[in-house]
Amino acid sequence: MYINETDGVYYKFVPKTTGYYSVEGGFYDEEWNQIYSEEMLAGNAYYLAPYGRYWCIKQSEYTPIDPGGSGGKVQVKVGETYTHDMRKGGFYEFIPEETASYHFRSNENVKLEVKERIFEINGIGTLEGKVDYSVVMRAGSVYWIHLYEMDAATVTWTIEKTKTKTAVTGTKYTAVKGGSDTYDFVPSKSGDYSVSFNGKGGVLVYDDAWNEIKKYYPEEADGSRVVLSLEQGKTYHFAVAALEKDMQWEIESAKTKTDSYTQI
């Protein structure tokens, strides 16, 4: 633990071992480029600007290792099935080739953790139990996957590119409890569109480049609806999940509704 006596002071840090390090503050390389959760090389000089009065540097516990015990990284590939012995620790590493939504599934009960290196990322669906979870990942970024034991000694799991369905206005769709589905919606004209729910669930809305434009939490979407302003001809992705039980949801033109709503 160090005490930062003066604001605006930078400290020099030279790692003894190559790895991932974290601090309450910012790391910079020798050319003063800020580092975001990158591997730091032993013997190289780095500089940091700590936040607050007290700070310390920690080596990250999230360095990927082979769950089989060899000490190497396990590179996950889309479409392949993996069997994990829960008695052995370890992390998997995934580097997407394209920016898209990816879907995780398991055959047994397990707790899944997905991070961009050491940072949490937001997805939708079930992370504990029989995993059925979708999350958007960026091409070239490094993601770490960790499985935590629940009641199964061995867990079989897979990651696939999310298969999308097509949504149109005026049709009710069912989100099944414990799962997550992603729909593509292309407005026929520009304007406001309402998304209504008859139960408790959640939705993540993305534009055609998979940039998140709205996050609607489960506790908010309980028999309610929201309105989005969408553009004609553009593709929008709706990732939907039910929380307590199966839930119906629907997209309609907002002009057909006269009750109150929340504008997005």
Image (spheres, rainbow, N blue to C red):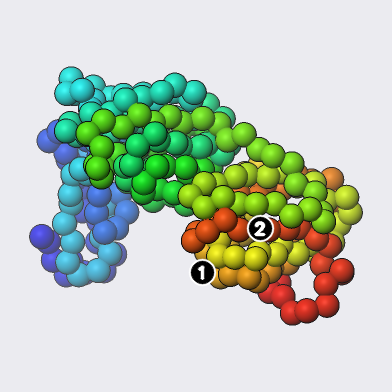
- Amino acid type of the residue that numbered disc 2 sits on in the rendered structure: Gln
Residue at 71% over, 62% down: 195
Q: How many marks?
A: 2
Q: How busy is the neighbourhood of tag 1: few (under 14 within 10 Å), some, or many (20 plus)?
A: few
Residue depicted at x 17% and y 31%:
88
The residue pinned by badge 1 equals 219
- To which residue does mark 2 refer? 248
Q: Is residue 86 above or below residue 10?
A: above
Q: Image quadrant for the N terminus? A: bottom left
Residue 215 vs residue 256: left or right? left
The vertical placement of 213 against 7, above or below, is above
User: Which image quarter: residue 54?
Assistant: bottom left
Amino acid type for the residue under numbered disc 1: Glu
Q: Residue furthest right?
A: 189
Residue 121 seen anywhere in this rendered image of the structure: yes
Q: As drawn, is 144 to the left or to the right of 190?
A: left
Above or below residue 54? Residue 130 is above
Q: Please give the name of the residue rendered at 31% of the width and 32% of the height, measured from the top-left corner.
A: 155
Which residue occupies the foreground of this view, 65 or 26? 65
Looking at the picture, how far across and down is residue 9, in whole percent? Answer: 24, 61
| Nearer to us in this view, 50 or 169 | 169
| Sequence-wise first label, 2 or 1 | 1
Residue drawn at (33%, 42%), measured in percent from left and top?
109
Residue 203 image point, x, y percent: 59, 57
Mark 1, secondary structure of its residue: strand
Q: Give the mark toward the camera: 2 or 1.
A: 2
**Helix or strand or loop: what does disc 2 sit on?**
strand
